Amino acid sequence: MRRFAGWGVIGLLVILMGAVPVQAEDVVLAVVGPMTGDSAQYGVMARRAVKLFADEANKRGGLLVAGKRRRLRILVGDDKADPKEAAAVATKFATNRKVSVVIGHFNSSCCLAGKPIYARYGVVEFSYGCTNPEVAKGSPWTFRNVFEDTFQGQSVATYAKEHLGLERVAVFFDNDDYGRGLKDSFVAHANRIGLTVVGQEAYDRESFDFRAQLTKLRTLRPQAIFVSGLYNQGGLIASQARQLGMKRIQILGADGLASDEYIRLAGPAADGTIVTSPFLFDLGGPDSKAFANKFEARYGVAPDWIAANAYDAIGMIAKTIEDIGSADRKAIRDALAAKTTRAKGYNGITGTTFFDENGDCKKPVYMQEVKGGKWVAAEKQME
């Protein structure tokens, strides 16, 4: 796989895409995420997937809405993984009445910042990556097609205990909504199943040197460290842990570490890392493999679970608009909220998406690990 390059041009791409005139008959959707900054890989993956779907639809003449073909137009917003920026982007798109749905955000703190704004103006916020347990609660306008951290954290703890046979783990967590929520669910479930959490340390997202906290954790003699955070810090944590002599300690993580950039940053220290993932192409069907081939042929890089989720998000929205014959905001929201069973759900490349009363979806957790510098499906999967 080729690494991402040319981040400096992303801001220009966003501006240019947003500058294309929107026609009166267009169906307008927005995709939002971190398009620049340390977390840019996440947002760019989502943007690429959404743009791929839109281009495919437009080559067929657009969406068939109430018997008429309408072009699918995509606007792009950069929240920079910052809640303040997310609120500004949310306001921009929510107040633009041409925008029918916002596909985003990726970071839980950004989803939470945008949630009341989208609710106030009555536009669906459809997240492809926010996993904090509170993201979809309390607003009828927020949906997501990714599992939430209570389930994910519990799964990591269960996997460590039952599949890896571990007894003592330490937790190193990003001190934000995502890191804390995931950490809390992991620790609570570990306590229930008899997995001993020997210590917990927090870090800030702006940090680059984690050796002090790692040294403290090392003295507690854990068999594994669960890194509850994102790839950019996670890669440095893995590398510094090995430099401190923690060579036999298992590194565990969640979906925030599931990135090629984690491997690049950690180097050889990445090998052996095991993390959760909402989706693995290795275990997907023919439709997911076809998407992966199209994505890589176009962008020169293999898609990840974020691209897959974003592709399914716009696919579900597009089908909903065609089914109801309208791009009206409330009509879309009502139709999505009615998809409460597997039979009523959307069958995409990541499986079937349907929602509970909060707008959350139920999907399985997959496990992947780094072998030989590449992510592969773990030999042992959750039952």
Image (tube, grey):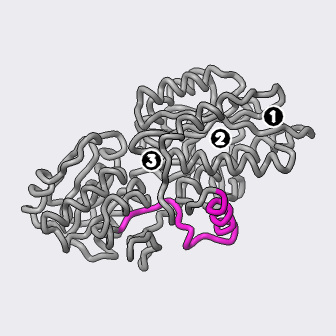
The answer to the question of whether label 1 and label 3 lie on touching residues, with beta carbons closer than 8 A, is no
Q: Earlier in the sequence, mark 1 or mark 3?
A: 3
Per the rendering, the mark at residue 131 is 3
Instruction: For mark 2, give the secondary structure.
Output: helix
Instruction: For mark 3, give the secondary structure.
Output: loop
Residue 59 location in percent, x, y? 83, 49
Which dot, 2 or 3, sits closer to the camera?
3
Badge 2 is on which residue?
337
Which dot, 1 or 2, sits closer to the camera?
1
Residue 244 location in percent, x, y? 13, 63
Badge 1 is on which residue?
326
Work out which residue is located at the far right of the displayed protein and give it.
67
Q: Earlier in the sequence, mark 2 or mark 3?
A: 3
Work out which residue is located at the far left of the displayed protein and give it.
219
> Which residues make up the magenta segment?
274-298
Amino acid type assigned to the residue bearing label 2 in the image? Ala
Amino acid type assigned to the residue bearing label 1 in the image? Ser
Instruction: For mark 1, give the secondary structure.
Output: loop
Q: Nearer the viewer, residue 96 or 55?
A: 55
Residue 380 location in percent, x, y? 41, 78
Q: Is residue 76 above or below residue 178?
A: above
